[in-house]
Image (cartoon, rainbow, N blue to C red):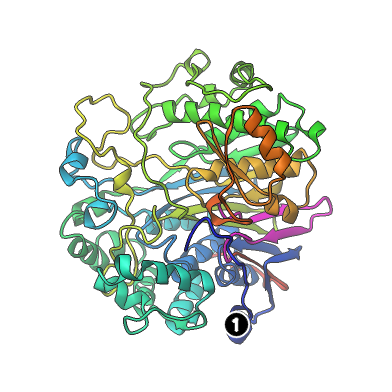
Amino acid sequence: MNLRTPLRMSLVALVIAALLAVPALALELETAQSVRSTQGVVTAAHPLAAAAGAEILAKGGNAVDAAIATAYALAVVEPHASNLGGEGYMVISLADGTEVAIDYRSRAPLHVNVHTPAETGWPPHGILTTLIPGMVKGTELALQKYGTMTLAEVLEPAIRLAEEGFPMGDLLASQIADAYESFLLEYPEAGKVFLDNMLIPEPGTIFRNPDLAHAMRLIAEHGSDVFYFGEIADAIEQATEGWVDKASLAAYRAYERDVVRGTYRGYEIVTAPPIVSGVRVVETLNILELFDLAQYGHPNHPTAAHIMAEALKITQADYNAYVWDPNFYRVPVEGLTSKLYARERAALISLDEAKRYEAGDPYAISPAGEVAFTPATVEESPSTTHVSVLDKDGNAVALTQTISSFWGSRIVVPGYGFLLSNHFRQFPGFEVDDPFRPDYAAPLKTTRTVLAPTILKKDGEVRLVIGSPGAARIPQTVVQTIVSIVDFGMDLETAIRTPKFHVSGLTLNLEGGWPAESAEALAALGHRVNTNYGELDLFFGGLNIIAVEDDGTMIGVGSFRRDGGASAPLVVEEAVVH
């Protein structure tokens, strides 16, 4: 798919018909692109995945149970963007006041060292781009500590989807068509799973993945041990020719981490800690809070957009310099998220011109830290996926997961039907002799990424659950959408549909739909304006959001830039706690 072509969204009638045809899902759910509910809501990049999560809510599960069910369902219905061989980050906010982040980023195998990337030649995909997957371990950790159901219960909808199949939508069919010659013919195991007798499937084709269903049944029965120690671990080692070996799989750990907190115009921000982008979201909003954005009337007003773009450039410089793997470096989170530091950084912004910015000095406020370094640039993908869940009791989960590029490493584990990620390419692809460089490759180290699952609360109650795919666009899209809702009073659908921008250096990429006069005014300020994008272009992400109105009604909206959907239970069974 050409990312510069507008994506024609269609929650196809046959997908909705498929939902109604599955007896377990006809279980009193409402599934559409947008739903309203008081019984809980799930939004995801595919309506069937959202419905899988809503099914769990309808059966009495909580938001954590539903988020994990949705994450596994996405491995079936959106396999090119996330999978069992990938990773993610989850932010959990429970009604009892518990707030925690689950870090299940992929990590380098035990044999990797500082020289390995140069030795491999830094390929874009293939065996040498894979890392130790984190999804299975991380979701299990979250379920055991904060869920109410068993793995077998939450995996059941995804297993059913993989076994019985579903009608392939336009987006997945298009992604397979684009990948046909570039990799599906080159990687026969992938072709076996995703092609129709080695031919490109048409939209509406019933897609099944019995091998993936088998893998998920094993996980449901045996837990993560089968993946990291048992027969699936054997298969991963063989599929990667020992690159991801059983010793490395056995050494993998997921982590509970403290959330990053902030405030914005009376809202509490709860977001993901380093090595992902929650710190940047908070720092950017701290800077923007110092400007009266509402006076400009609309986020596409050139002055409002200019201020947001400059703030995002400043926080990108700080993120590049200071945010690294917290298992290896002490990141100055307190300084980066300080209102005092934001005031210092905001003073650099001129309303009259676009500028370049260097990293600041958060150590003056938070001395815990390591060296500053500007990383090598890596090719980025619009891959990744996001899930937002809010249950009837006020428990919320924002979960973003990925396999890096669309289709990840291209390696499908034979007999188990899942893709492995290609995150290793994000380590620097050149000889590194300085052991103090924050991005050097090392055993069990993870690469930096830009995931930004975020929850906004007011007076202790969840008001917004938000996140997006889209590589470097993720924190920018999340910030712009929060500003549209909080500063400009937009309803959820309008905020999502409002054209977005992505700033990189002095280049300002504008999504289709920006007023011509705004583009001209931004160019006059010194931005290098690029308008070569369509409306609702998936380059700018794929927001799946839930908002809560003052009366407690939850509104869920699935992405308009992808095949997103929202689902809600109409009736919720009494919860059974295991």
Looking at the image, residue 468 lies above or below residue 39: above
Q: Position of residue 59 (x, y in %)?
A: 62, 72
Q: Quadrant of residue 201?
A: bottom left
- Give the residue at the far right of this rendering: 551
* 557 inside magenta stretch: yes
Q: Secondary structure at mark 1?
A: helix
Instruction: Name the residue: 61% across, 40% down.
Output: 270
Q: Position of residue 73 (x, y in %)?
A: 49, 69
Q: Quadrant of residue 421?
A: bottom left
Looking at the image, residue 426 lies above or below residue 413: above
Q: Position of residue 509 (x, y in %)?
A: 56, 42
- Give the residue at the far top of this rendering: 364
Q: In terms of depth relative to the viewer, which is nearer, 252 or 243?
A: 243
Give, as a single range, the part of the protein colored magenta.
541-563
Residue 98 in view, yes or no: no
Which residue in the structure is indicated by mark 1? 14
Q: In terms of depth relative to the viewer, which is nearer, 106 or 319?
A: 319
Q: Residues within 10 Å of mark 1 (few under 14, many from 20)?
A: some
Number of numbered discs visible in the structure rendering:
1
* 358 inside magenta stretch: no
Residue 546 in view, yes or no: yes
Instruction: Name the residue: 63% across, 40% down.
Output: 479
Q: In terms of depth relative to the viewer, which is nearer, 310 or 193?
A: 310
Q: Position of residue 136 (x, y in %)?
A: 38, 59
Q: Main secondary structure of the magenta part?
A: loop
Which amino acid does the dot numbered 1 rest on?
A: Leu
Instruction: Name the residue: 48% across, 27% down.
Output: 317
Left or right, residue 160 beside residue 248: right
Q: In terms of depth relative to the viewer, which is nearer, 549 or 381?
A: 381
Looking at the image, residue 569 lies above or below residue 277: below
Instruction: Name the residue: 55% across, 69% down.
Output: 49
Looking at the image, residue 547 lies above or below residue 360: below
